[in-house]
Amino acid sequence: MSVSPADLVITGCTVLVHDEEERIAFREDAAIVVRDGAIASVTTAVAAADLAAGERIDARGQVAMPGLVNCHTHAPMVALRGLAEDLPVEEWFNDVVWPVESNLTEKDVELGARLACAEMIRGGVTCFADHYFHMDAVADVVTECGMRAQLGEAYFSSQGPQGRERSLEFALNHRGAAGGRITTALAPHAPYTVTDADLTATAGLARAHGLPVHLHAAENRDQTDASLARHGVTPVEVLDRTGLLDTDLLIAHGTGIIERDLPLLARTGGRTAVATAPRGYLRFAWPGTTPVRALRAIGVPVGLATDGAASNNSLDVWEAMTLTSLIQKSTEGDPRWLTSRQALHHATLQSARAVGLGASIGSLAPGRRADIILVDLTGPHTRPVHDLAATLVHSVRSADVRTTVVDGRVLMRDRELLTLDVPHVVRELERRLPSLTDRGHGRRIQEYDT
């Protein structure tokens, strides 16, 4: 019986795989066969040599990995990259970011999303969880450029019930869009900007409609201390009493999670995950970081993230992986934690689980969606290779990603973007920057007061 041609065959590479106990392993001189947007097999280069295919990629000298997932970002904020530098977080929000965001138009968001998606594709990010405004425009960009995304329309209680209703409307209208590449979430901003009543209502809507929730909580220790002083409860305890811990919940940052929060997070009624974006914590001089070791001990997956480029200056998940490993070693006082293989597990399966896609992406195995990146190891900064996991975590840079594939579609090949016109986007965005960045009006969309 003849076998129909594969859509794509990637051959001659080393493939990062997970064994039956989810440990990281590598298969050398391997090939990946893709059909109908999914991985049909991971086999040997010899076995795939004569296989008919619509497209073939010779990946000798490269490592094939699951595409990276940016588990928490505000993609359109690339338009504000470098605008608010060297400020404490209160001034960053109140004096710059929230006044500027009061100027946002849908066109600004569209252009920012295009630039962000180009940056992420070039850095090997195939999926991102976005939490922002005018998200219809972001959904259109994701549909066009070929990425995968979990999208949520952010809201504050200061918007009245319309904010929460708009978040629900967006989530229901767009889930399953782009051939299934778009999933959606309800997106209250944070416990300090959304009332308990609105959080409780959001939890009810999430359960009624089968939607996850993505929000900021316990971002730093100051927020936790302020919540305890004002209300007698931590931000995580607010999530518990409002029912959000009984939903599928993605918590951004969590550097303010304290020991009394851990039992609540260990027995949640839904799928709870935390996204860590360590570069921003260093930038704001926060004294702590996400308690990855404690969360992992209670079974809470921690995914890697960048946050928005206004606070991080970058959408580089490779850097997030490196910093997570290094900062965990420093924080724990233990060079054996986080190991390179543990960091790769956070970057792959745990990040996929964090955005609710653990059953379909995050590993290269038959039946998984074909979200694949090819990483070039021929550069002098990656040679020699004594420990491939360590090379990937501590030596590889985002510019080493040669090819990015999502759902079997090649979005970048040999560093050439195939679905986005960056020069055009940059010209249009820079033309709009004076009106976007004007703060003379004295308005702000919200106030940071935890």
Image (cartoon, rainbow, N blue to C red):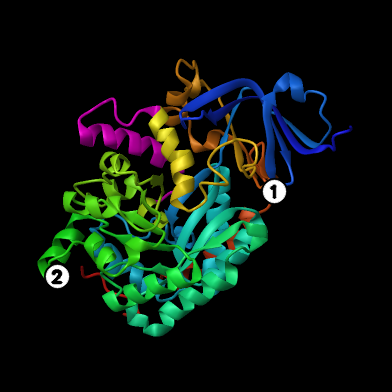
Q: Is residue 232 left or right of residue 308?
A: left
Q: What residue do we see at 22% from left, 62% from top?
A: 237
Q: Secondary structure at mark 1?
A: loop
- Residue 445 in sight: no
Magenta stretch, residue numbers: 313-340
Residue 231: mark in rendering = 2
Q: Is residue 338 left or right of residue 220?
A: right
Question: Where is residue 65 shown, x and y percent of the image?
Answer: 56, 34
Q: What residue do we see at 35% from left, 67% from top?
A: 97
Amino acid found under the numbered disc labelled 1:
Leu
| Image quadrant in which you'd find residue 204 | bottom left
Q: Secondary structure at mark 2?
A: helix
| Image quadrant in which you'd find residue 373 | top right
Residue 418: mark in rendering = 1
Question: Where is residue 146 shown, x and y percent of the image?
Answer: 65, 54
Which residue is more in the foreground, 125 or 367?
Answer: 367
Amino acid found under the numbered disc labelled 2:
His
**Upstream in the sequence, badge 2 or badge 1?**
2
Q: Nearer the viewer, mark 2 or mark 1?
A: 2
Q: What residue do we see at 43% from left, 50% from top?
A: 354
